[in-house]
Image: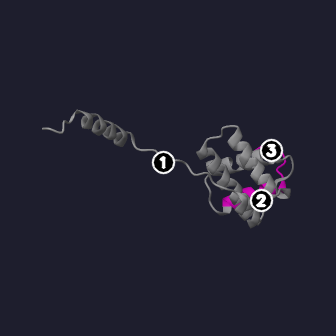
Amino acid sequence: MTDKAISPLRRRLIEDMTIRRLSPNTQHQYIRHVKSFADFVGRSPDKTTAEDVHRYQLHLGSIGTTIPTVNAGDGALRFFFKVTLKRRDLADAVVSVREPRRLPVVLVEATEILYQTSACVREDH
């Protein structure tokens, strides 16, 4: 453990995650996402507004953050706002991004084969 002081808010977040038995890796990622949000806002995250959450999510989209990373951060922020801060209004302001579904490679190849063979079939046979 380090000698660095931990803020009461971070300590409370860690305690909340420990009570709910989140894995050490999940705890690390949640802390990282909340810190990133706080750095973006420029003040303590307990003093943020729904507009701050909206601006942060727009920022993540503008810098090309991948959808899975955005959604992981959304989960972290929702947990932080709902459980640690007890601010359901801010948790409701967090919006998850829908990831487009992709066809499996096998299905794509099968579709291409059907397309190619259909061009070879003659109507008069």
On the image, which quarter does residue 81 sit in? Answer: bottom right
Q: Please give the range of residues in magenta.
A: 1-18
Q: Quadrant of the N terminus?
A: top right
Q: Residue at x 82, y 54 (%)?
A: 45
Q: Earlier in the sequence, mark 3 or mark 1?
A: 3
Q: Main secondary structure of the magenta part?
A: helix
Q: Amino acid at mark 2?
A: Arg
Q: Earlier in the sequence, mark 2 or mark 3?
A: 2
Q: Are marks 2 and 1 in contact (CB under 8 Å)?
A: no
**Residue to which mark 2 is pinned:** 12
Q: Amino acid at mark 1?
A: Arg
| 44 in the magenta segment | no
Name the outermost residue toward the front.
124
Q: Are marks 3 and 1 in contact (CB under 8 Å)?
A: no
Q: Residue at x 71, y 40 (%)?
A: 62
Q: CA distance from mark 2 to mark 3?
A: 21 Å
Q: CA distance from mark 2 to mark 1?
A: 37 Å
Residue 13 at x, y percent in the picture:
74, 57
Q: Residue at x 83, y 48 (%)?
A: 41
Q: Amino acid at mark 3?
A: Phe
**Residue to which mark 1 is pinned:** 101
The nearer-to-camera label among 2 and 3 is 3
**Residue to which mark 3 is pinned:** 40
Residue 31 at x, y percent in the picture:
72, 49
Residue 52 at x, y percent in the picture:
80, 52
- Left or right: where 70 falls relative to 11: left
